[in-house]
Image (tube, rainbow, N blue to C red):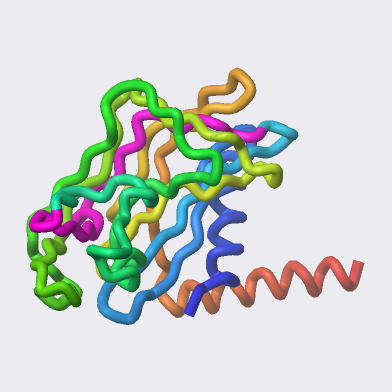
Amino acid sequence: MKSKVAFALIACLVMASTSFAAIGMNYDFEDMGNGLVQFSVYAFGTDGDKPSVIDGINVAGGQGVHNVALPAGGIAAVVFDSDWNDYMMDPALKALDSHFITPASGYQPLGPNPTETNDGSNPAGIPALNSYSMPYLAGMGTLNSAVDTALGFTADASGQTYVLQAVTTLEDALAGNVVVTGFVRAGGIDEAVELALVVPEPSTIIMLVLGALCLVGIRIRK
């Protein structure tokens, strides 16, 4: 189940900590139910600034991020959403792979393509073979684009563009060990990002919800 309420509260806290920045990154998350958590990361803009470039993005930390590859099919690393081959790789596993989301307009990359690593540890117990009896390689690692490797795209009209899917273990998600670093650019603004991907403990969610309800109650009374 997607934790929309928790995400909304977390996003408020994240934005409050960067309230002076016109652009940045935020995220939503989903518990995949197999020991993994999927994070949907967005480049966002406020005050009319719509981000159209991400640069030097690195996703790493803790046990790392979960990557799925099919070396036998010539797909050693899926670093862009558009790299996924539904004819060779089970579409259901796409949700368990960390990669950059390709906007509708596509990326205009400058510099080397992003890279990923994969230790083959398979913490979620993904089947060893796909429906074509071809072996998968699933494990933990990193996903990154080199500094000064800019990925340009047409900004979403809403000012919030889905740019990255990062999947990690529940343990690391609870601890906030996985961090996205790099830069987001919009309208001549170059904003450094250091975003910990964290899922709060249930007790923390309850406290945040109660706190929000208290604030709403105070507002209503006023």
Answer whether residue 53 is magenta in the image: yes
Image position of 207 (left or right of 98): right
Q: Nearer the viewer, residue 48 or 195?
A: 48
Residue 21 lies, in percent from the top left, at: 60, 33
Q: Is residue 62 above or below residue 116?
A: below
Would you say 194 lies left or right of 132 here?
right
Above or below for 33 versus 170: below
| Residue depicted at x 43% and y 49% | 101
Quadrant in the picture for residue 86? bottom left
Residue 10 in view, yes or no:
yes
Total numbered labels: 0
Residue 213: where, in percent of width, then height? 71, 75
Q: Residue at x 57, y 46 (%)?
A: 161
Residue 175 can be seen in this image:
no
Q: In percent of the image, x 40 and y 26: which residue is there?
A: 150
User: Residue drawn 48% across and 80% down?
Assistant: 1
Residue 5 on the magenta span = no
Looking at the rendered image, the quarter that the C terminus falls into is bottom right
Q: Is residue 73 left or right of residue 175?
A: left
Q: Which residues are magenta?
A: 50-73
Can you say whether 155 is above or below 16 in the image? above
